Amino acid sequence: MLLPLYVILGGVRAIGFEECNALVSTLDGEPPAAIGVQAASGFGTIFAAERLWSTNPASAILLFVAVNGSMAATAWNGAGITR
């Protein structure tokens, strides 16, 4: 969770690039807002998986795998950019 925060909070701009995602670019330089979005995203995923677990555990696991895979791919890309 820390690498995406670093990228959002200006790590990309520090090396001469700009955020291309229009929704995330509004968070650039706004640490409380960026942390809030990251926390809400994590909470939302956990909440949805917990609700889903009671009716369909396989879907809850698939949700976690998909979200974690997406986050890992984003972090991998961000790490490649900020090297």
Image (cartoon, grey):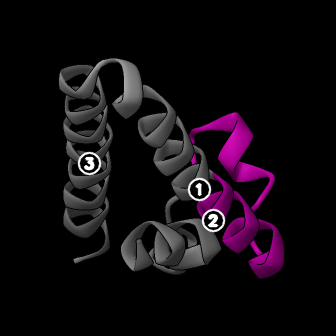
Task: Check if mark 1's residue and mark 2's residue have beta carbons within 8 Å.
Answer: yes
**Dot 1: element:** helix
What secondary structure prevails in the magenta region?
helix
Q: Residue at x 19, y 38 (%)?
A: 65
Q: Position of residue 82 (x, y in %)?
A: 31, 73
Amino acid type for the residue under numbered disc 3: Asn
Q: Residue at x 32, y 50 (%)?
A: 71
Furthest residue toward front? 54
Amino acid type for the residue under numbered disc 1: Phe
Q: Residue at x 72, y 39 (%)?
A: 23
Q: Position of residue 50 (x, y in %)?
A: 45, 42
- Does residue 50 lie above or below 39 as drawn? above
Which residue is labeled 3 in the image?
Answer: 68
In this rendering, does residue 18 appear at all?
A: no
Highlighted magenta segment, given as a residue range:
19-40
**What quarter of the picture does the C terminus occupy?**
bottom left
Task: Check if mark 3's residue and mark 1's residue have beta carbons within 8 Å.
Answer: no
Please state which of residues 17 and 10 is positioned toward the viewer in this rendering: 10
Please state which of residues 79 and 31 is positioned toward the viewer in this rendering: 31
Alpha carbons under labels 3 and 2: distance apart: 14 Å
Alpha carbons under labels 1 and 2: distance apart: 6 Å
Which class describes the residues within 10 Å of circle 1: few (<14), some (14-19), or many (20+)? few
Which residue is labeled 2 in the image?
Answer: 39
Q: Position of residue 42 (x, y in %)?
A: 52, 57
Alpha carbons under labels 3 and 1: distance apart: 13 Å
Which residue is labeled 1 in the image?
Answer: 43
Comparing labels 3 and 1, the label whose residue is closer to the camera = 1
**Dot 3: element:** helix
**Circle nearer the N terminus (3, 2):** 2
